[in-house]
Amino acid sequence: MVKKNKLTDREIGIIKAMLKFFPKLSQQAIHSYFSKPGRDFNQARITNIAKGELGKIVPTATKQEAEAYMSTYTGTGDLP
C-alpha cells in the first residue's frame, strides 16, 4: 500500500531548513505549512525530522529556499 500523504524529500529538506534557520517557529507552525484537507499527517513526523529519525540522508534546504517557500505559502500545503 502506498502512503498518499508521505512527505517528499523536498518537503523534508524545507522542514529541516525551517527547524535550523527559524528556531522560533514551533513544530506545530511548521506542520501547518504542509498539511491541508485531504493531506494530513501526524505532527510527530516533524519531531522525527528534528531528531534525525526521518530523512536523515535528505539534504537541508537553504535558508533562501525555506524563505521562498514560506513567502509564497498559499495555505494549500502545496509547494510553489
Image (cartoon, grey):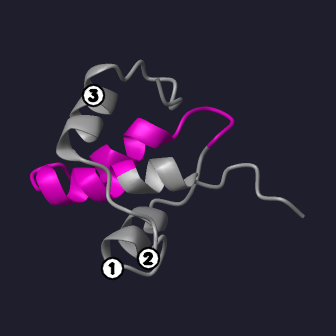
| Disc with the residue nearer the chain's start (3 vs 1) | 1
Q: What predominant SS class does the magenta segment belong to?
A: helix
Packing grade of label 3 (10 A; few <14, some 14-19, many >=20) is: few
Relative image position of residue 1 (x, y in whole percent): 90, 64
Packing grade of label 2 (10 A; few <14, some 14-19, many >=20) is: some
Q: Which residue is mark 1?
A: 51
Boundaries of the magenta span = 14-39
The relative height of residue 52 versus residue 8 in the rendered view (above or below) is: below
Identity, as a three-letter code, of the amino acid under mark 3: Ala
Identity, as a three-letter code, of the amino acid under mark 2: Lys
Q: Which residue is mark 3?
A: 68
Q: Secondary structure at mark 1?
A: loop
| Disc with the residue nearer the chain's start (2 vs 1) | 1
Q: Which residue is mark 2?
A: 56
The label on residue 13 is none
Q: Is residue 3 magenta?
A: no
Labels 2 and 3 touching (C-beta < 8 A): no
